[in-house]
Amino acid sequence: MGLFNFFMQEIAIDLGTANTIIYYNDKVVVDEPSIVAKDRATSKTVAIGRQAQQMHGKTHENIKTIRPLKDGVIADFQSAEDMIKGMIKMINKGRSWFAPSLRMVICIPSGITEVEKRAVKDSAEHAGAKEVYLIHEPMAAAIGIGIDVEEPMGNMIIDIGGGTSEIAVIALGGIVTDKNIRVAGDEFTHDIEEYMRRQHNILIGERTAEQIKIEVGAALPELDEPPADYAVRGRDLMTGIPKEIHVSYSEIAHALDKSISKIEEAILSCLENTPPELSADIYRTGIYLAGGGALLRGLDKRISQKTRLPVHVADEPLRAVAKGTAIALKNIDKFQFLMRE
């Protein structure tokens, strides 16, 4: 068994709609966009991750870019498998002279169906994993933030990723109440595209909208430390000629308002379903924010105003889930009960 473990390579994967992060030996070895570029004629994978993202929205008819995950679950089975394989190869570059056994811990959304779980497991097994464990995202986020998930204490975690927002109350190593909505980073990006088209008559692509979200994305129309206006280039819908306009963070806050309200409703609904003893704990501990959406300026303040509870943003919100998955992998015996093999 000792020898077998010696040949066992262990990796933790946060398989996200927008980004995939892989931990190996307590280090982030892969942090790439979840995207694959394929040759239309042969269906061969041309590029994955950052390379494929640079092609996104700029391809000619022979190449197509695919995002294998939609709303936190695998939408394109073959591409997901190719992407996982390619990213595992990135770890082993110039290192492995034999193919060791692979043990993987992958985190999944809490509202996932059995069929969707199966798809994740199958993709991992086809990519070479001998053992696959699954852990729910809010649980992984809680472990990554540094919360002791096993104690009899209620903690509320909100993980706003690319495809889904996961809201969960955790106590005694389990999820007591949870709410999973498909409004998250991708929806924000889509809102920005729509707003630019409606309000400014300018057509922009997904990558530009994503960039606007990063540069001037906000949840409140008035911020203490506002970012500078951002120059946006796109196609004028009236003339068809490329043009440039400047957008401010308050415009983007207005564009994102509806989607953020949906997340707030889900938070309130989750709080309503929480047992009173745990509500008392949450009043003391507050709410923890993780995931890329936690980086949206003023979101913590807005949620705090809505719930009248303290809101804490994780240190590295983008990596909290991946970090928790890696900790669970390292202490697999301790956290075995959290994972469904």
Image (cartoon, rainbow, N blue to C red):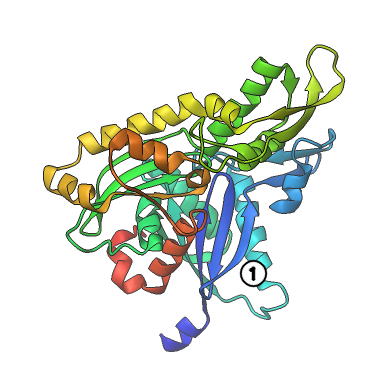
Residue with the mark numbered 1: 91
In the foreground, 312 or 35: 312
Above or below, 205 against 77 in this view is above
In the image shown, does 120 or 22 lie closer to the viewer? 22
| For residue 112, side relative to residue 244 (left or right) | left
Tell me where residue 278 appears, x and y as whole percent.
Answer: 17, 48
SS class of the residue under badge 1? helix
Residue that sits furthest to the top in the current view: 238
Q: Residue at x 72, y 40 (%)?
A: 65
Judge whether residue 231 can be spotted in this image.
yes
Q: Picture coordinates of residue 52 (x, y %)? A: 74, 48
Q: Report the residue that reaches farthest toward the bottom.
A: 3
Vertical arrangement, residue 202 with respect to residue 303, above or below:
above
The quadrant in which residue 97 appears is bottom right
**Residue ID at (58%, 37%):** 217
- Quarter occupied by the N terminus: bottom left
Q: Is residue 112 above or below residue 191?
A: below
User: Residue at left 69%, top 52%?
Assistant: 49
Going by the image, does 214 lie left or right of 47? left
> x, y (%) of residue 328?
38, 67
